[in-house]
Image (tube, grey):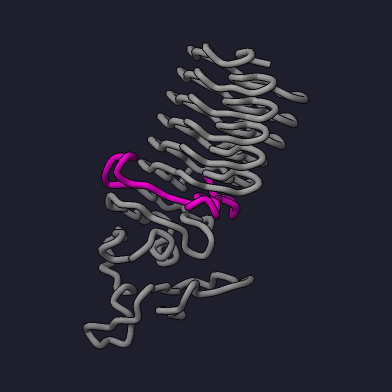
Amino acid sequence: DTVLCGNTPDHIYGPWTYGGGMCFASSCEDSDGDGSPDECASDYDGILEVPSEYSSIQYAIYAASDGEEILVSPGTYTSVDNVVINPLGKAITIRATGTPEETILDGQGVSIVVLCESGEGAGTIIEGFTITNGSYHYGGGMRNDNSSPTITNCTFSGNTSVLGAGMYNEYSSPTITNCTFMNNTAYDGGGMCNYFNSSPTLTDCIFTGNIAEYSGGGMYNFVSSSPTLTNCTFTGNSADYGGGIANASNCNCTLTDTTVCGNTPDQIY
């Protein structure tokens, strides 16, 4: 039940624990004089709107409770507290009201874009965004650590990292539908890297133009990670090994109605 408002460049630096009922607001303006910033007002309809009610997606997440929905209007959104979206383990839906081309999550080349590390499950839904310009050692666009959210109708493009530039999964098996991974660059797993028992389910996804300096231009699977892919396409990806898909120790992809073509130097390694 604590309000932090109008602090720059961020509200809190260093470890802290979310105890509930907090409000993070970019402005302390209180037009109705109720002692609380306007951005902290709630209409109790279970829908939090960005930017009309909350200036950033992350501020809306801080205010949201399980089962609520954050609706994000078209625009470009950048990082708050070193990330654009961190659902904090909440079973919430974060949905763009426009198209992915209109609603952009931009890491600006200095931060991870989407971070799920608090045990997010299928009830954490992220839908309809372009996730771009993320830069981090593991997962520039999105990192899932012991978390398995639902990702729908998103485009991961122009992200960089050492492992999994578009998406990095560690002990995580997200459900990914109708997503495009394009023009991402990593050492391993240009489009996606699945690591340590990560077996995501992908349906109707496209991997194209992704580059890995070593293994898995489109996707790299390592240490008992075995994703399931249905009706997906891998084309125009490149790496030293496994231009399309590279499988390392104890890994195996299940491919159904999936096209793997035009990758260099090979399709699957």
Q: Quadrant of residue 25?
A: bottom left
**Dividing the image into 4 quarters, which one contains the C terminus?**
top right
In the image, what residue occupies the spot 48% across and 24% down? 208
Looking at the image, which residue sits at the far left?
32
In the image, what residue occupies the spot 67% across and 28% down? 221
Q: Pick whichever, 213 or 125, lies toward us.
A: 213
How many marks overall?
Answer: 0
Relative placement, left or right, of 247 versus 174 is: right
Magenta span main SS: loop
Q: Looking at the picture, how far across and down is residue 32, in whole percent? A: 22, 84
**Dividing the image into 4 quarters, which one contains the N terminus?**
bottom left
The image shows residue 173, relative to residue 142, as above or below, that is above
The image shows residue 199, relative to residue 123, as above or below, that is above
Q: Is residue 118 magenta?
A: yes
Relative placement, left or right, of 266 versus 53 is: right
Q: Pick whichever, 177 or 102, lies toward us.
A: 102
In the image, what residue occupies the spot 41% across and 74% down? 23
Q: Is residue 159 magenta?
A: no
Q: Quadrant of residue 110?
A: bottom right
Relative placement, left or right, of 4 versus 254 is: left
Q: Looking at the picture, how far across and down is residue 265, in whole percent? A: 63, 14
Q: Pick whichever, 138 or 119, lies toward us.
A: 138
The image shows residue 227, relative to residue 100, as above or below, that is above
The part of the chain drawn in magenta is: 96-121
Q: Looking at the picture, how far across and down is residue 242, in whole percent? A: 65, 19
Looking at the image, which residue sits at the far right?
249
Q: Looking at the picture, how far across and down is residue 215, in whole percent? A: 68, 26
In the image, what residue occupies the spot 63% across and 47% down? 145
